[in-house]
């Protein structure tokens, strides 16, 4: 009797939390569709294999362990990753192809993160099918396309970008270093053989997805939000989550708490943290605040240094943790608003739970996400973005107390239901099946 050949996928995330999380969610989804899964990852920010017993994990070292990842050196780190991954990845894949042959398996496709553009050359050389996973929104890609197409001086204009309205020229990314310009050009030039997965939903970004397909003539698979489709909810967090905040939330009134978190890279300095503490205290709202280790030297010492009235307000109305189980937090009935840096994962997680956002973009795609939230979907609050206690207090009250915040919450609730529908039986469901078919059809 002929033994059936199993299809194995090799997935390659870069070592950043905001990129590892969606890649592991995608892996979970594809495993449920019958594929065997290998994750090739760095030892820095390494995922915890015991949370994913069905996957094989293989080390692919980039030598980043000594490097402090921050928004300031993100571009350089990405350039280093691309330069360093090619030769070890080739070795790893050659080895995997051999092992697969011995085990009645086949490497059916390599799925890599959009930041890791140099992987395409390896896939081609080894004649492996390839797919890119883009973990930012589709519109973000179009903003890069718009910048590359125009003279940089245009970007100073206050006008709208015709093909991206309501985004203006000032919302376009600034490519302010040669390394960054090179990286963007390379990212846009990559043509994976099977297509590009976007962690987005047609009802959020249908127009942008259509345009990307027209421009690049590569299949687009809008299979989002990945965290909703991945039925297995095992944690992909690189940092231990502090569940004590869920107990604290259980004791709060419905929709009374503002959740404050800037994701895994962006941060406030000590002076800004103090202004935020004052603003939150003066807003008189309840808050759950994530202050990551490394943001300042000693959080307890800083808390101790605050004036008594702020300390009392934090004790009475606040809960501070180092890292929260964010999806559970956003799904909790006690949470009524999210002060976010608008990373795409946080944005999607909030949209899926119908939680309106106070937008404070820091870098990269976050500005575009904030514009979409505030101007297109109208579930995000645009404010002065000045970290000063009175500005913070005003913005928090606008979101949590005022009529405009309530209207945003109603729209967010509607959007949440549209997204649910897309996942259950609509566009995301169809896109996933389409992608699985195209992997299987090249591996017949
Ligand atoms: C990075 C970029 O900064 C972002 O702009 C891009 O869209 C994705 O990659 P990051 O800054 O970490 O990501 O933000 P985000 O995309 O929001 O991802 C953060 C992830 O960490 C989310 O999945 C969130 O649920 C999780 N998280 C965050 C926690 O689990 N606990 C926390 O306390 C904070």
Image: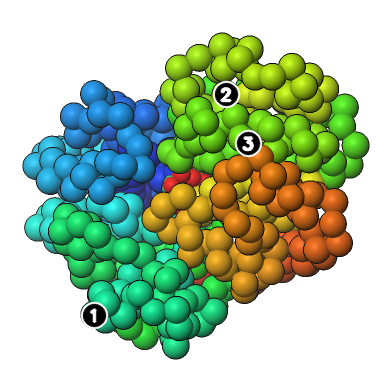
Q: Name the mark nearer the viewer: 3 or 1.
A: 3
Q: In this view of the protein, which residue sits in the foreground, 313 or 417?
A: 313
| In the displayed structure image, the side of residue 189 where residue 23 appears, left or right | right
* Position in image of residue 185 (x %, y %): 20, 67
Q: Is mark 3 within 8 Å of ligand 1?
A: no
Q: Residue 112 carries which label?
A: none
- Distance between the alpha carbons at the discs numbered 2 and 1: 43 Å
Q: Which of marks 2 and 3 is nearer the N terminus?
A: 3
Look at mark 2 in the image and give the residue it sits on.
Answer: 322
Q: In this view of the protein, which residue sits in the foreground, 228 or 377?
A: 377
Q: In terms of secondary structure, where does tag 2 sit?
A: loop
Q: Badges 2 and 1: C-beta atoms under 8 Å apart?
A: no
In the picture, residue 18 is in which quadrant?
top left
* Position in image of residue 426 (x %, y %): 64, 71
Crowd around label 3: few <14 · some 14–19 · many ≥20 (10 Å): many
Q: Which of marks 2 and 1 is nearer the N terminus?
A: 1
- Distance between the alpha carbons at the discs numbered 2 and 3: 16 Å
* Position in image of residue 237 (x %, y %): 50, 32
Q: Which residue is drawn at 35% across and 37% down?
A: 70
Q: Is mark 2 within 8 Å of ligand 1?
A: yes
Q: Residue at x 45, y 79 (%)?
A: 158
Q: Name the mark nearer the viewer: 2 or 1.
A: 1
Crowd around label 1: few <14 · some 14–19 · many ≥20 (10 Å): few
Decide if residue 294 is in sight here.
yes
Decide if residue 105 is in sight here.
no
Q: Badges 3 and 1: C-beta atoms under 8 Å apart?
A: no
Look at mark 3 in the image and give the residue it sits on.
Answer: 276
Q: Which mark is residue 151?
A: 1
* Position in image of residue 211 (x %, y %): 42, 83
């Amino acid at each position: 009797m002929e033994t059936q050949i199993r299809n194995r996928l090799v997935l390659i995330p870069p070592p950043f939390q905001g990129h590892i999380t969606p890649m592991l969610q995608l892996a979970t989804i594809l495993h449920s569709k019958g594929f065997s899964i290998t994750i090739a990852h760095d030892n820095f920010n390494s995922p915890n294999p015991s949370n994913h017993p069905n996957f094989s994990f293989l080390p692919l070292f980039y030598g980043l362990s000594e490097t402090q990842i921050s928004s300031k050196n993100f571009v350089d780190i990405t350039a280093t990753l691309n330069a360093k991954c090619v030769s070890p990845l080739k070795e790893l894949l050659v080895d995997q192809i051999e092992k697969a042959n011995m085990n009645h398996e086949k490497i059916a496709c390599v799925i890599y993160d959009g930041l890791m553009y140099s992987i395409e050359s390896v896939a081609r050389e080894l004649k492996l099918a390839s797919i890119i996973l883009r973990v930012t929104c589709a519109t973000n890609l179009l903003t890069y396309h718009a910048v590359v197409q125009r003279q940089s001086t245009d970007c100073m204009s206050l006008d709208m970008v015709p093909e991206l309205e309501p985004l203006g020229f000032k919302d376009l990314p600034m490519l302010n270093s040669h390394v960054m310009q090179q990286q963007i050009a390379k990212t846009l030039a990559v043509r994976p053989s099977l297509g590009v997965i976007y962690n987005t939903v047609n009802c959020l970004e249908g127009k942008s997805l259509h345009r990307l397909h027209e421009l690049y003539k590569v299949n687009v698979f809008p299979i989002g939000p990945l965290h909703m489709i991945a039925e297995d909810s095992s944690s992909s967090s690189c940092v231990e989550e502090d569940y004590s905040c869920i107990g604290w939330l259980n004791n709060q009134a419905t929709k009374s708490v503002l959740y404050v978190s800037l994701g895994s890279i962006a941060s406030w300095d000590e002076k800004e943290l103090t202004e935020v503490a004052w603003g939150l205290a003066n807003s008189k709202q309840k808050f759950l605040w994530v202050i990551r280790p490394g943001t300042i030297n000693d959080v307890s010492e800083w808390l101790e240094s605050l004036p008594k009235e702020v300390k009392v307000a934090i004790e009475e109305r606040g809960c501070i943790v180092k890292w929260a189980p964010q999806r559970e937090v956003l799904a909790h009935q006690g949470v009524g608003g999210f002060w976010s840096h608008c990373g795409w994962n946080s944005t999607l997680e909030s949209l899926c739970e119908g939680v309106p956002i106070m937008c404070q973009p820091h870098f990269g795609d976050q500005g575009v996400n904030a514009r979409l939230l505030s101007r297109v979907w109208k579930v995000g609050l645009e404010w002065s973005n000045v970290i000063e206690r009175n500005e913070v207090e005003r913005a928090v009250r606008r979101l949590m107390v005022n009529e405009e915040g309530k209207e945003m919450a109603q729209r967010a609730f509607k959007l949440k239901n549209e997204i649910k529908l897309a996942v259950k039986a609509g566009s995301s469901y169809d896109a996933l099946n389409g992608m699985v078919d195209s992997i299987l059809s090249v591996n017949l």
